[in-house]
Image (cartoon, rainbow, N blue to C red):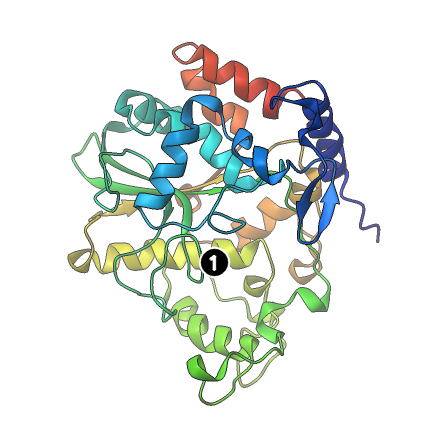
Amino acid sequence: MSKTRHFYETEKIRQTDLIRNGFFGESEFGNGNFRGKNYPFVLQQKAAYTNLYEPIRSEAISYFRENDIDWWAGNIPTGHLLSSQIACVNHLMPIRKDPEAVLALINGIRNQFKKVLPLPCDADESYIAFEAVSKTDHLKEDGPTRGSNCTSVDALIYAVDCNDERWIIPIEWKYTESYDDCNSGDKSNERITYKVEHNPNKKTKGTVRLERYSDLIEKSSQLRTVPEFALGKTYPLKGSIYFYEPFYQLMRQTLWAERMLENKDLEDVKAEHYLHIHIVPKANTDLLEKKYRPAKGKNMEETWRACIVEQSKYMIIDPQDFMQPIKDSRPELWNYLYKRYYNI
């Protein structure tokens, strides 16, 4: 099986060309360091801020600092031009204070909402929250920390529908990601041991994940149990599709949304319904069209839809299609996004 990541490789070349053509400023800004090595598609640290759309640079950096959110690469925006976190921020940060624009986006997916509400988790008035977490830890994790070490969503919208019922709309944003489905990708079988202070019994990461999520999956009204994929007896869900990416993330976010609704009295964001939005570029066939071995050869969407009960709670959409409703009202943003992400 070929491990070539075609979309990733294409985007590396295209983003490197943008650097050379001065899209990010100086043409010498490339060959930045990422995890100890230099790459032509990574901006140098001094220019990493140019990875953000110029009108939101100061706002984005302040927003992450004021809300105590970790960037993907640490305490500053990464210079990696293929970062999905940066892509999400570039798309949505420019409109986070514009309720009409945010409403247009979600009604472009499902035309049933009459208004959006500000997110109480943010330090200022915002209609899109980034790296959102629950107020209370409902998933038996180490506690809510925005951007790291727990289940979070890339972006969150809070809306009211035409029946005056409230919705949380978690958004998972993908760009060039793709995932291996060999046995080493099974997060339920990871043998690394957690640090002693968090794990006095010295359980492996795989065992901790199984103990953390299996019971929640079994009790979920949205997630189907998948014994036909399971390999374990002590832990029936061991080796199941829920512990392979990207389904591991989708599983946790589904549980997160369900628990937010079930425990709304403990949360500042109180809702009766949720809509899980998955943003994936159509061109990323490495992710979308891969035939996942633990799912008996289904592609990504087929695999996930086989795992969930109510299909309307999950929507997958291309980022360009998602942003289409604000193309005319935000032409400068659209032009930037087109050159940066859509002109494939």
Q: Residues within 10 Å of mark 1 (few under 14, many from 20)?
A: many
Q: List the residue tagged with mark 1.
A: 251
Viewer-side residue, 142 vs 3: 142
Along the horizontal axis of the image, is 267 left or right of 38?
Answer: left
Is the residue 175 above or below the residue 36 in the image?
above
Which residue reaches farthest front?
46
Residue at x-position 55% and y-position 56%: 247
Q: Quadrant of the C terminus?
A: top right
Is the residue 187 above or below the residue 247 in the image?
below
Q: Position of residue 68 (x, y in %)?
A: 34, 50
Q: Position of residue 259 (x, y in %)?
A: 30, 60
Residue at x-position 60% and y-position 26%: 341
Q: Secondary structure at mark 1?
A: helix
Along the horizontal axis of the image, is 305 left or right of 288?
Answer: left
Task: Confirm whether residue 88 shows in the render.
Answer: yes
Residue at x-position 48% and y-position 84%: 196
Along the horizontal axis of the image, is 145 left or right of 237?
Answer: left
